[in-house]
């Protein structure tokens, strides 16, 4: 089961980072794996809400059905997903406010038989995507 993480210190208060993170119409501006929400993001954003997202990882398109798990405004947003070929995903965004700055950490994991065949490449690709996404997100809110 590959696990990935990335973290950035963003020069913006947690509320501003949270607003950008949960503005699903803006994901194409900062998430490098995101290619679209076929039916829009979760509305309303609440624990238990589900939504579909089209992604591209390692050059391969995939549709993931996400379920919102943990949701604490300006602190935590966690989603679990079901992808193609029996792949299960977990993504957790953790915000730690520090005055006018915010530490944002993204943790993710992938499980399933298809994952074991390419675990190393997937981990490297996902880690690079997370770091680039954090860089772009910071650029939108700073």
Image: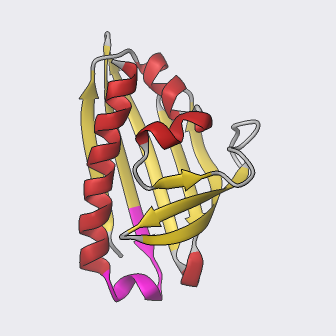
- Residue 126 is situated, as x and y percent measured from the top left of the image, at 32, 61
- Residue 110 is situated, as x and y percent measured from the top left of the image, at 42, 70
Q: Is residue 74 visible?
A: no
Q: Which residue sits at x=71%, y=43%?
A: 42
3 shown above or below 51: below
Q: How is the image coloured?
A: secondary structure
Q: Which residue sits at x=58%, y=63%?
A: 81
Which quadrant, please, contains the C terminus?
Answer: top left
Q: Which residue sits at x=25%, y=56%?
A: 128
61 shown above or below 21: below
Residue 58 found in image quarter: bottom left
- Residue 25 is situated, as x and y percent measured from the top left of the image, at 61, 36
59 shown above or below 31: below
Say whether residue 56 is left or right of residue 105: right
Per the rendered image, the range of residues in magenta is 109-118
Q: Does the magenta segment cover residue 119?
A: no
Q: Which residue lies furthest to the top in this view?
A: 99
Q: Does the magenta segment cover residue 113?
A: yes
Which quadrant, please, contains the N terminus?
Answer: bottom left
Q: Is residue 14 visible?
A: yes
Name the one closer to the observer, 112 or 127.
127
72 shown above or below 6: above
- Residue 99 is situated, as x and y percent measured from the top left of the image, at 31, 10
Say whether residue 132 is left or right of residue 70: left
Q: Which residue sits at x=54%, y=70%?
A: 62
Name the one closer to the observer, 62 or 71.
62
- How many callouts does the rendering have? 0
């Amino acid at each position: 089961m590959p696990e990935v993480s990335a973290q950035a210190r963003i020069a913006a208060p947690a509320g501003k980072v949270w607003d950008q993170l949960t503005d699903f119409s803006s994901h194409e501006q900062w998430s490098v794996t995101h290619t679209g929400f076929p039916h829009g993001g979760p509305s309303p954003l609440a624990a238990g809400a589900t939504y579909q997202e089209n992604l591209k990882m390692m050059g391969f398109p995939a549709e993931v059905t996400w379920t919102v798990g943990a949701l604490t405004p300006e602190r935590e947003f966690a989603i679990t997903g079901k992808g193609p070929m029996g792949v299960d995903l977990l993504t957790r965004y953790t915000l730690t406010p520090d005055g006018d700055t915010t530490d944002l950490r993204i943790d993710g994991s992938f499980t399933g038989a298809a994952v074991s065949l390419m675990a190393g490449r997937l981990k490297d690709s996902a880690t690079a995507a997370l770091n680039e996404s954090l860089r772009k997100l910071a650029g939108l809110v700073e």
